[in-house]
Amino acid sequence: MKVRFTRQGVRVRIDDLELTALQRGEALMLETLWPGGGWTLSLDPLSDGIEGVDGHLRAGMKSLLPELAEPAREGVTLPGPPRVDVEKDFGPQHG
């Protein structure tokens, strides 16, 4: 999972194995921690909505996961705030 902060919110790029994990009901999490704080982002396939507290952001993917899994779709947007764009980044690494 690759995460980028933008002016509009957060941009998340996932690969094919991560999409498969979401479809199996497994949450994806990325964290950057330091003494006294940190940031955590999780994509939760079992809930909906966006929830953020003290540097921890959870993006619920349940209702958008079928749309994201469509082969023709490049990504989906959770409107937020903050807005979270989840995009597929399928390269040849797992082919």
Image (cartoon, rainbow, N blue to C red):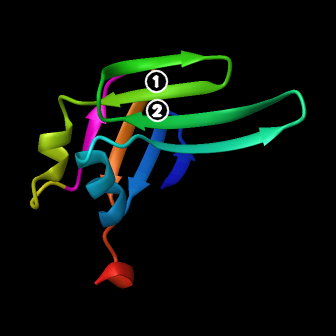
Q: Is residue 54 left or right of residue 1?
A: right
Residue occupying image coordinates x 53% and y 40%: 6
Q: Are marks 2 and 1 in contact (CB under 8 Å)?
A: yes
Q: Is residue 73 magenta?
A: no
- Which quadrant is home to the C terminus? bottom left
Mark sitting on residue 8: 2
Q: Is residue 68 left or right of residue 25?
A: left
Residue assigned mark 1: 82
Label 2, label 1: how many angstroms apart (C-alpha)?
7 Å
Look at the numbered disc 2 and give the secondary structure of its residue. loop
Residue occupying image coordinates x 29% and y 55%: 19
Q: At which x and y percent is residue 60?
A: 34, 27
Residue occupying image coordinates x 23% and y 47%: 23
Q: At which x and y percent is residue 69?
A: 16, 52
Look at the numbered disc 1 and give the secondary structure of its residue. loop
The magenta stretch is 74-80
Residue occupying image coordinates x 12% and y 43%: 67
Depth-wise, is mark 2 or mark 1 nearer the camera? 1
Residue density around tag 2, few if under 14, some if 14–19, many if 20 or more, within 10 Å: few
Q: Amino acid at mark 2?
A: Gln
Q: Is residue 78 magenta?
A: yes
Mark nearer the N terminus (2 vs 1): 2
Q: Amino acid at mark 1?
A: Pro
Q: At which x and y percent is residue 64?
A: 19, 34
Q: Report which quarter residue 15 is drawn in.
A: bottom left
Q: At which x and y percent is residue 52?
A: 54, 18
